[in-house]
Image: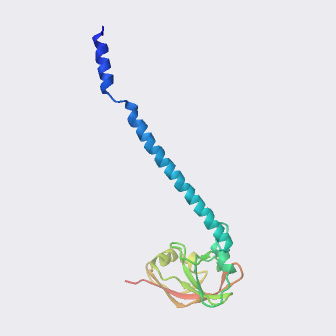
Amino acid sequence: MIKNPFQQLRKENVAEKPDPNSELIEEMRILLKRIKKLESEVEVIKKTIQEVDILNKHHELDIRTEDTSPKDEIKQRDIQNSPTILYMSAPTADGVFSDFAEDIQIGKSIYVLVVETKERGTFSVIESKDAIATAIISTTQFLKPACKIVSSTNGIPNQIVTIEKGTAVFDGEFWKVEQKAIIKLEKKA
């Protein structure tokens, strides 16, 4: 017999309510299964990477490391059959292109150089809007070290016309202007 009526209510409430932790336990069980599955997938990926590394070493693939720059590859390449195209940023005041790459770099590349032999190539200003906009920022700094400007327009030019390509020689490390390109600056409507 129950002496206290509240004890009866408490027993009834306890009997009706499911264990509040059971939902959390089920959720944890599901999460643990997912974690185990992900861990096994990570192990498979690690093994695949190891196998690829072994294959690369076996076949002596040329994989670029972080300390190899594109400039080093360009210097080492034997230029024989087809001309190589290099994109150059502004030269130094004495006409040395110390920064060049095989891919155009928007906002940085101003010149394109066609390598004709190991030591010689011809260059001109890239005729894209981005390159022209970069070059026009400072004609003294970006154009005059490598170009002779024969005519200019009133106002801000938006086109650079190459009259004659310049020539550059490779000294084993950098390209140096041998003969300046002849250009004119125009304002196209």
Location of residue 139 in the rendering, given as x and y in whole percent from the top left corner: 54, 78
Whether residue 122 sits left or right of residue 134 in the image: it is right
Location of residue 140 in the rendering, given as x and y in whole percent from the top left corner: 57, 77
Q: Nearer the viewer, residue 116 or 179?
A: 116
Q: Residue at x 66, y 67 (%)?
A: 54
Quarter of image, res 43: bottom right
Position of residue 66 relative to residue 100, above or below, is: above
Location of residue 118 in the rendering, given as x and y in whole percent from the top left corner: 68, 87
Whether residue 176 sits left or right of residue 43 in the image: it is right
Q: Is residue 10 visible to the viewer in this orientation of the structure?
A: yes
Which corner quadrant holds the N terminus? top left
Q: Residue furthest front?
A: 1
Quarter of image, res 187: bottom left
Q: Is residue 68 visible to the viewer in this orientation of the structure?
A: no
Whether residue 1 sits left or right of residue 101 in the image: it is left
Q: Nearer the viewer, residue 110 or 102?
A: 102
Q: Nearer the viewer, residue 87 or 180?
A: 87
Quarter of image, res 30: top left
Q: Residue at x 63, y 62 (%)?
A: 50
Which corner quadrant holds the C terminus? bottom left
How many numbered dots are placed on residues in this image?
0
Location of residue 186 in the rendering, given as x and y in whole percent from the top left corner: 45, 85
Position of residue 133 relative to residue 53, above or below, is: below
